Image (spheres, grey):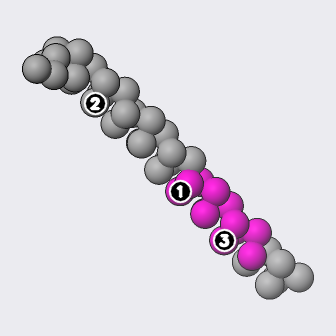
């Protein structure tokens, strides 16, 4: 039972960090797009 709870919290941590990484990447992508808009490629 304890093992199951440990596994669940481990999965929750992985999921949370996965969501954080995903949102961070999305933010970077958006900023990159806006930066490229300010400095058009020649």
Instruction: Please provide percent x and percent y for residue 39.
Output: 13, 19
Q: Residue at x 53, y 56 (%)?
A: 17
Q: Give the range drawn in magenta.
A: 7-18
Q: Which residue is drawn at 79% across and 74% down?
A: 5
Question: Badges 3 and 1: C-beta atoms under 8 Å apart?
Answer: no
Q: What element carries label 3?
A: helix
- The stretch drawn in magenta includes residue 9: yes
Q: Is residue 39 left or right of residue 34?
A: left
Q: Which quarter of the figure has residue 8?
A: bottom right
Question: Badges 3 and 2: C-beta atoms under 8 Å apart?
Answer: no
| Of marks 1 and 2, the one in the foreground | 2
- The stretch drawn in magenta includes residue 10: yes
The residue nearer to you, when weighing 22 against 11, is: 22
Q: Earlier in the sequence, mark 3 or mark 2?
A: 3
* Residue position marked by numbered label 2 in the rendering: 32
The residue nearer to you, when weighing 2 against 28, is: 28
Q: Which numbered tag is attached to residue 10?
A: 3
């Amino acid at each position: 039972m304890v093992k199951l709870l440990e596994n669940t919290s481990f999965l929750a941590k992985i999921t949370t960090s996965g969501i954080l990484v995903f949102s961070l990447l999305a933010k970077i992508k958006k900023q990159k797009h806006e930066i490229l808009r300010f400095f058009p490629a020649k």
